[in-house]
């Protein structure tokens, strides 16, 4: 009991990691069901039977919601900061321990409410993780749109509350609990990332909170914020009033796009830190990296319209959003080029955490390159509802996010167990995951270019337009199974490496400089975070932040 | 309790300053003429007596920032919905937005809320008056609490009055036949006033909590924190209300 209702940040980090693990397992199983259905539509599932089209849409919805909120947000934005953020700034505690702990309890409540949607009559909602009205606003619009949709919305409202509380605690911690001497210029880049992503969380999740409240009001209180005029569902005219579904799109994506950066910024900070460590070089252009992080955060608030090019938005607005979107490529490229420069000149020490960072960089580039393509309203008009977009965000958000999560887990595992994860298993996990992830998501670009639509339960039907894509689908499905299967190696490794038999790794196994590895609270520091590289008169090639130049 | 403060190790290593720590005042008594601002000649941020206060304030401000976004998004939704039209079968552009005249009682409510901002600020300031705080900290009675309490009571009363006034505004609209789901404008009227009232309701809870805290909390700092955070929250709600008031009265 004391373990669950803890206010100690490392304990909370463990709890968040378990929660993320539960969500990722369920989310992955759902995606496998989708893959099976797309390839072999007539196969009957155990306990369920043949997947109907609405079941497929429910799978899409729940897979997206679980992964985006409870895995890609919870782990980098809640679990990791609790694990290392206080230590990285020389403190033991978060600034507001109880607020911070309450955020975890509300997150778990949110997950339970969401999962309850599977067990209500008619099952889970089918409106997708974006839940566009009117489909999401009218209970009669489809199976799962009654109770299931309500549960989804309540889960989102709870999650928003928890996210804002958690971020308030992170911001207060960074601003107020830094060790003396740990100036802003001496913060590890991970801390900068969490500062920006927490700021984004406070802004973005408040917008989503309001949107969810308005939608609940449309559903139950007879308003029409989002319900358009003349709406007829199943032959029954719905509420009067000329509400605007576009309003939902604006509110949702005003949350939804910053959310992408909430997911990926912590990974970017981690990539900079880990590349510095494993190349034994300082981060060149520390302030450039900081400025890029801030700029990504600021620009990220002004690009939401690129999700709406084909929604009937004013074309001029589309052009403006296209421009801001392409502008984000500038700070992103600055970060990527810095990482590449570090790799070129550094002596890479190849370890599993580094490999996963390289995987992160690879996915960030591969997925990022299709970003400017989709940022053109004209090109997006063709590609928007195809698998090209699915490929884009699964590479740049999902895979990059997941690989940075793996990098973080392999890197910080010694903080949790005192031991390193098994290197051989780790490398097997990495290489197969990398190949299988590309094998799963790369062909989706091609399928999308060929016109394969999103959200269709199957490609076969009276019209055989996409019959030639079925072999591609089969390949994607096999690759997805490989990707899921190799995660068992990771799970095995997590438990196998925690055995008492495994040798302890020591206090600073990666020879890192940042304060989380000092093993104790350090209320003072007098140096920057990335002092790697050999200098004359020193036996070590790094100077940790907790070693003073001269005694205090 | 020592009358002078000698610095020794036990004192500097203490994380939380309780009784016998450092007094929670801005200016530290240094025996006249200013002197060392820094009580311990070291970084004041970590170990200063006001560190905890600043931490709590920071949390309140972050959450208020989220709230600010919430209301800003609400205002923009108001304008989007206001300009939302559809094209009827007759090819006419039809808007379902019916302007409503806000009940005049809102003006009185606004005045009451502004007055309550004044009273809560008085309460807050009394808890930070240096001489009183020093006296409380030394255990010589509770002058700060005694002076602040009437102001807090007045704030609770004014806040309650404001909420009652909002309730009357809703009743007046309802007698005109304007209910929550009547037309887009009325949704927004009830939504804007309702969400704000919900926030004020929480604020009233916080005020009551602060009252209890003033008498129950053993540590002077914790009393200050309870009142200070509540006051900032209350101020923010006052400012938000001004904007929302202008919105629902003048942007019909």
Image: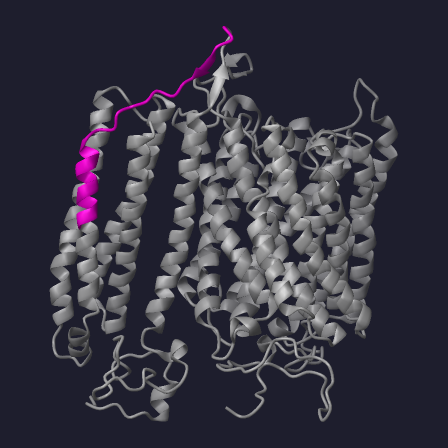
Residue A233 in the image, given as x and y percentages of width and height: 54, 17
Q: Residue furthest top?
A: B90
Q: Is residue B146 above or below residue A500?
A: above
Residue drawn 12% across the image and 65% down it: B147
Task: Give the residues in magenta.
Answer: B90-115
Residue B182 visible in rendering: yes
In reply to whether residue A506 is colored magenta, the answer given is no
B36 relative position to A489: left or right? left
Where on the picture, by quarter, is residue A456?
A: top right
Residue A415 lies in quadrant: bottom right
Residue A399 falls left or right of residue A65: right
Q: How many marks?
A: 0
Rendered location of residue A480, percent (x, y): 78, 46
The relative height of residue B22 versus residue A176 in the rendered view (above or below) is below
Q: Residue at x 21, y 45 (%)?
A: B113
B119 sits to left or right of A121: left
Is any atom of residue A32 visible in this view? no
Q: Quadrant of residue A354?
A: bottom right
Tell which of A4 and A376 is nearer to you: A376
Verify whether residue B91 appears in magenta. yes
Q: Which residue lies at the image location 56% right of the left edge and 66% below the top edge?
A: A191
Q: Position of residue A221 (x, y in %)?
A: 38, 27
| Depth check, front residue: A196 or A318 | A318
């Amino acid at each position: 009991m004391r373990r669950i209702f803890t206010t100690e940040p490392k304990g909370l980090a463990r709890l968040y990691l378990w929660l993320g693990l539960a969500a990722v397992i369920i989310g992955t199983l759902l995606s496998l069901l989708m893959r099976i259905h797309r390839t072999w539509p007539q196969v009957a599932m155990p306990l369920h039977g043949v997947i109907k089209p609405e079941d497929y849409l429910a799978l899409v919805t729940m897979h997206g919601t679980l992964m985006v909120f409870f895995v890609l947000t919870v782990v980098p934005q809640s679990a990791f900061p609790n694990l290392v953020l206080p230590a990285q700034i020389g403190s033991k505690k978060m600034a507001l321990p109880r607020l911070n702990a309450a955020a975890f309890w509300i997150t778990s409540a949110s997950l339970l409410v969401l999962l309850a949607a599977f067990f209500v009559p008619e099952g889970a909602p089918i409106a997708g993780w974006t839940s566009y009205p009117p489909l999401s606003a009218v209970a009669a619009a489809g199976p799962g749109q009654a109770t299931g949709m309500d549960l989804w919305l309540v889960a989102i409202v709870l999650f928003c509350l928890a996210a804002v509380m958690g971020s308030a605690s992170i911001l207060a911690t960074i601003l107020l609990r830094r060790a003396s001497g740990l100036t802003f210029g001496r913060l590890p880049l991970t801390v900068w990332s969490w500062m920006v992503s927490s700021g984004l969380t406070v802004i973005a999740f408040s917008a989503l909170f309001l949107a969810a409240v308005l939608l609940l009001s449309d559903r139950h209180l007879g308003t029409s914020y989002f319900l358009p005029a003349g709406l007829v569902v199943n032959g029954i005219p719905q509420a009067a009033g000329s509400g605007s579904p576009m309003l939902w799109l604006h509110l949702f994506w005003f949350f939804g796009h910053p959310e992408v950066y909430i997911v990926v910024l912590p990974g970017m900070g981690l990539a900079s830190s880990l590349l510095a460590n494993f190349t034994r070089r300082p981060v060149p252009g520390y302030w450039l990296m900081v400025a890029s992080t801030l700029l990504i955060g600021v620009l990220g608030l002004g690009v939401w319209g690129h999700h709406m090019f084909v929604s009937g938005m004013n074309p001029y607005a589309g052009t403006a959003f296209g421009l801001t979107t392409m502008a984000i490529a500038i700070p992103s490229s600055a970060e990527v080029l810095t990482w590449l420069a570090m790799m070129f000149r550094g002596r890479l020490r190849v370890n599993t955490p580094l490999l996963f960072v390289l995987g992160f960089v690879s996915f960030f580039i591969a997925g990022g390159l299709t970003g400017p393509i989709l940022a053109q309203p004209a090109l997006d008009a063709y590609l928007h509802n195809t698998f090209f977009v699915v490929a884009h965000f699964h590479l740049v958000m999902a895979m990059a996010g997941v690989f940075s999560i793996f990098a973080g887990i392999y890197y910080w595992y010694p903080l949790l167990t005192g031991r390193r994860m098994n290197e051989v298993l780790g490398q097997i996990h990495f290489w197969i995951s990398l190949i299988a992830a590309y094998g799963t998501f790369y062909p989706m670009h091609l399928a999308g270019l060929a016109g394969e639509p999103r959200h269709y339960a199957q490609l076969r039907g009276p019209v055989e337009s996409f019959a030639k894509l079925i072999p591609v689908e089969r390949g994607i499905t096999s690759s997805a199974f490989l990707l899921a299967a190799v995660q068992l190696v990771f799970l095995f490794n997590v438990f196998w490496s925690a055995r008492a038999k495994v040798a302890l790794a020591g206090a600073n196994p990666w020879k890192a400089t940042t304060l989380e590895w000092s093993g104790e609270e350090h209320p003072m520091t007098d140096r920057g975070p990335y002092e790697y590289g050999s200098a004359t008169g020193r036996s070590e090639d790094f100077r940790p932040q907790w070693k003073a130049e001269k005694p205090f | 309790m020592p009358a002078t403060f000698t610095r020794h190790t036990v004192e500097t290593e203490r994380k939380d300053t309780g009784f016998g720590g450092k007094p929670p005042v801005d200016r530290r008594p240094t025996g006249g003429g200013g002197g060392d601002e820094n009580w311990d000649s070291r970084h004041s941020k970590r170990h200063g007596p006001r560190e905890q206060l600043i931490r709590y304030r920071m949390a309140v401000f972050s959450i208020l920032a989220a709230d600010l976004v919430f209301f800003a998004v609400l205002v923009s939704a108001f304008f989007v919905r206001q300009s939302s039209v559809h094209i009827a079968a007759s090819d006419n552009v039809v808007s379902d937005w019916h302007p409503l005249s806000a009940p005049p009682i809102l003006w009185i409510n606004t005045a009451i809320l502004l007055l309550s901002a004044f009273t809560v600020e008085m309460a807050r300031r009394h808890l930070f008056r240096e001489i009183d705080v020093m006296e409380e900290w030394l255990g010589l009675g509770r002058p700060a609490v005694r002076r602040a309490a009437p102001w807090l009571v007045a704030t609770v009363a004014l806040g309650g009055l404001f909420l009652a006034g909002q309730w009357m505004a809703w009743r007046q609209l309802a007698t005109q036949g304007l209910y929550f789901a009547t037309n887009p404008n009325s949704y927004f009227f009830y939504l804007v006033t309702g969400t704000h009232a919900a926030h004020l309701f929480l604020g009233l809870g916080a005020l009551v909590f602060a009252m209890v805290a003033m008498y129950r909390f053993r540590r002077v700092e914790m009393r200050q924190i309870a009142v200070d955070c509540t006051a900032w929250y209350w101020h923010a709600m006052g400012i938000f209300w001004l904007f929302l008031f202008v919105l629902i009265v003048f942007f019909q």
